[in-house]
Amino acid sequence: MRSITPKITAELKEHVGSEAVAKAPPFPIESFRGLVEHIARLSYLNPDHLLFYRGQNSDFLNKAGSTTIYPGLYRSENTSKDELRHRFTLLDQAGKELVKRWAESKLDGLRDIRQKTYVQWSILQHYSVLETPLLDITHSLRVACSFAQHDATADRSIVYVLAMPQVTNRISINSEDDLVNVRLLSICPPSALRPHFQEGFLTGTTDVTWDFDNKTELDFRNRLIAKFSIPSGTKFWGRGFNSIPQESLYPNNDRVSAICDGLRESLKTELQAGDLANS
């Protein structure tokens, strides 16, 4: 993907100093309202991009001490090309099995599930079946902060701000930036509740593959505008705001969750290289 040079606020400039945003410590901010106001200024300074967010329990750093934001499939360091090729093979096989189980369950949306790989990947990733070449992001700052706090293992959590091309379709492909952005609200069938409650998007490089020249081309730190450190407790929200409960982000009575739970179990024993392909 093409890297950007972000325009940042005076406070962030003072905070990062001579470092790149990815190498500087996260900017601490103590309230949700304060974060919204800071994001508003960043949006104004970067009018050619649409800002998206990702909440995490910590700032993931590489050996050089820089933030790294890889999609799950690429996240392991020093992964061989053979291992990546095997992961793509498993992903393809899991997608075929998902289509089969979807048809057996007679859920709406079979045509999109069968025809669009990005829909298969969206379901497999959002229901924790397999990691994919796509990264979970959201256009909702409240969702990102809620996820960051739910996953917290320390007294502070992290929110990344990413600059993306404008979204024009259900699947927006920008050839100049070499990015694809999948709007899950529009592309996931209504029976898949989780992506709708999470206001989710998935993004990745176009022509995703296991065979690349330079892995850093797949790192979303190339699109990083800012990273914030927020308190993990309820005090962060203040009057008039509140975290989204975990049970709302992962709603009950989700029929797709039942399909994916069964598929995840089958992967533990059945989905070795070639198993489903030869069945």
Image: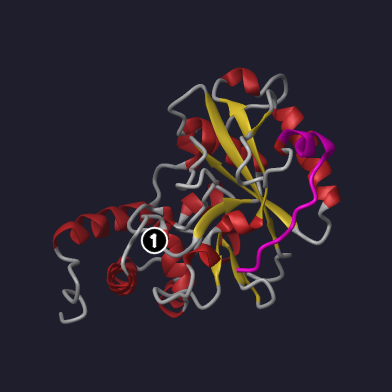
Q: Which residues are magenta?
A: 1-15
Percent across and percent down for residue 257 are: 36, 52
How many numbered marks, from 0 up?
1
Residue, x 41% and y 61% (percent of image)? 74
Percent across and percent down for residue 221 are 59, 54
Would you say residue 201 is visible in this rendering? no
Tell me the element at label 1: helix
- The residue sitting at 16% across, 82% down in the picture is 278
Q: To which residue does mark 1 refer?
A: 73
The one nearer the camera, 220 or 250, is 220
Label 1 crowding class (10 Å Cα cut-off): few <14, some 14-19, many 20+?
A: some
Q: Is residue 65 left or right of residue 9?
A: left
Residue sitting at 15 percent across and 80 percent down?
Answer: 279
Q: Amino acid at mark 1?
A: Leu
Q: Is residue 105 left or right of residue 180?
A: left
Which quadrant, please, contains the N terminus?
A: bottom right
Q: Quadrant of residue 125?
A: bottom left
